[in-house]
Amino acid sequence: MSQHTAAVAVVISDEAGRVLICQQSQGHRLWGLPGGKIRSAESPIHATIRDIREETGMEIDIVDLVGLYQLTGGNSTALPDVLVHVFRARCSKAEATVNSPGRISHLTWADPAYLPDPMTATAKIAISDAVKGRSGVVCHVQRNVEPDIPDADSADTILGTATVTSAA
């Protein structure tokens, strides 16, 4: 595909081993890792720190690069290929707040063994790699067939079927 986008995501774990995930507020409302597109003339590290601050209000320290994940395919040829830089990070406080309600609707700490559906293909693989302690992974990821777009009233239903717990 001729279009190509660069993005970042970050795996942040709490002391209980749970990972911070977010749910998109529009479209298919997939669960995924916090992050976003890299802006022009911005490094992946700066994009990661900026996106996490904008989306969650959290200040993070990058620990290492989990991997580079090349996302391709999907239902639509209009979707660009995406090179996602996934970092591992730690934070000084485990309290996250939805600061970008136009982009994400929910944040939660989830047990990596019981992640909610639907989840982005990149997030599933990157979380697994991070939990196993892997670094420097280079991986091709095929987009999942996207689920039906849920009704606006069904967000609570989606949350209700997920086996996740919120940080107290």
Image (cartoon, rainbow, N blue to C red):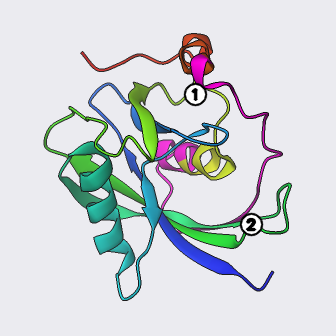
The earlier-in-sequence mark between 1 and 2 is 2
Looking at the rendering, in which quadrant would you find the C terminus?
Answer: top left
Depth-wise, is mark 1 or mark 2 nearer the camera?
2
Q: Kindly identify the amino acid type of the residue bearing the numbered disc 2.
A: Leu
Image quadrant in which the N terminus is located: bottom right
Inspect the magenta stretch and tell me whether residue 139 lies in it. Answer: yes
Per the rendering, the mark at residue 141 is none
Q: Is residue 86 visible?
A: no
Q: Position of residue 65 (x, y in %)?
A: 42, 66
Q: What residue span does the magenta drawing correspond to?
A: 127-153
| Residue 114 point in image, percent of width and height | 58, 22
> Which residue is disc 1 drawn over?
115
The residue positioned 26% from the left and 30% from the top of the image is: 15
**SS type, badge 1:** loop
Q: Which residue is mark 2?
A: 79
**Count of marks, rendered view:** 2
For residue 108, what is the image quadrant?
top left
Q: Amino acid at mark 1?
A: Leu
Residue 109 vs 58, above or below: the answer is above
User: x%, y% of residue 76?
Assistant: 84, 60
In front: 89, or 132?
89
Q: Residue at x 37, y 30 (%)?
A: 17
Q: Residues within 10 Å of mark 2 (few under 14, many from 20)?
A: some
Which quadrant would residue 28 be assigned to in this image? Answer: top right
- Whole-Å distance between the Cαs marked 1 and 2? 25 Å
**Residue closer to the observer: 36 or 33:** 36
